[in-house]
Amino acid sequence: MVKSFNTKADAMKWARHTESQLDLGTLAPKKAMPSLIRIVERYLAEVTPSKKGAAQELNRGRQIARTPLGSMQLDKITSEVISKYRDGRLREVSNNTVRLELAFISVVFEQCAKEWGYKVSNPVKLIRIPKPGKPRQRRLGPGEEDALLTACAASSATYLHSLVVMAIETGMRFGELVSITWDKVDLTARTIHLPDTKNGHPRTVPLSTRALEALNRLFSSDGVKVFAQHRGTIRAAFGAVLKRSGFGSDLRFHDLRHEAVTRLFEKGLNPIEVGMISGHRSISMLQRYTHLRPEGLLSRLA
């Protein structure tokens, strides 16, 4: 450590002060900050596995680590850097995707500051977060349900027909459907118990006659899971059906959950009843999933 002074007395005073700090251990070379990619790897290994949606966060974290941010040291990632990252990503992906990425970066910095002892501030807190995108309002139009189910029945993945029917009838999420085990199914009581859901609250889903028939077509006393295939295989099979039947990327599996929630309201169920079936715990979220058609309301007004 070198420093210049105008007088010898000032130099001696500084030297004594520096020596005392060294003796006390309060003066040490500043430790270089790790790169974001190293911190993300640690976060994905130590924190992510305990979370709901761990698979999605794992993919998101790896994607962010591959960007130019990944090679930067933590203390070099400022609000200006993050705002440029945000603007660049907004030209490539949707607002909601960018919001999720910024939320991940934010929790990583919070983990560093609060639990891992790094003296860094959270740059995401200082920037403007993109507004949420408009919620999807895709519903099945006239003839589309029949076309989709016909394509599923013609597929070599014959279980897709039952999967789609159950999605439309119960409003269950894709992950919930493909995780059902037979020990949670009560064919007599016509219910499926979901002990582990996205929001952390278990629920029991009633089965309509149509859903029960779809489930019975899959029944096997030997299997553990209702849908024995790997979820990636099921997604790929469903995507292939959409492509062959002309839906392409216009229809997503999650749209069937929107369809189901809306149909429950059209059947006359109240928000509490619909929420008990779908797992939504707030009216605002139910509104995002409900797309009533004006012509349907006209018949009730008349």
Image: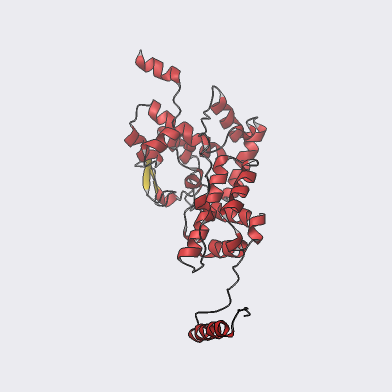
Residue placed at 58% from the left, 63% from the top? 75
Residue 156 screen position, x and y as percent: 63, 40
Residue 59 screen position, x and y as percent: 59, 53
Q: Is residue 103 above or below residue 190?
A: below
Residue 89 screen position, x and y as percent: 63, 45
Is residue 48 among what the camera can see? no
Q: Is residue 262 left or right of residue 13?
A: left
Q: How is the image coloured?
A: secondary structure
Q: Is residue 8 above or below residue 244?
A: below
Residue placed at 45% from the left, 22% from the top? 293
Q: Quadrant of the C terminus?
A: top left
Is residue 37 among what the camera can see? yes
The answer to which quarter of the image holds residue 160 is top right
The answer to which quarter of the image holds residue 285 is top left
Instruction: State the count of labels.
Output: 0
**Please, which residue is most extreme toward the top here?**
302
Q: Is residue 84 above or below residue 112?
A: above
Depth check, front residue: 102 or 260? 102
Q: Is residue 186 left or right of residue 100?
A: left
Q: Quadrant of the N terminus?
A: bottom right
Residue placed at 56% from the left, 53% from the top? 79
Depth check, front residue: 121 or 250? 121
The answer to which quarter of the image holds residue 276 is top left
**Please, which residue is most extreme toward the front here?**
7
Residue 49 screen position, x and y as percent: 50, 60
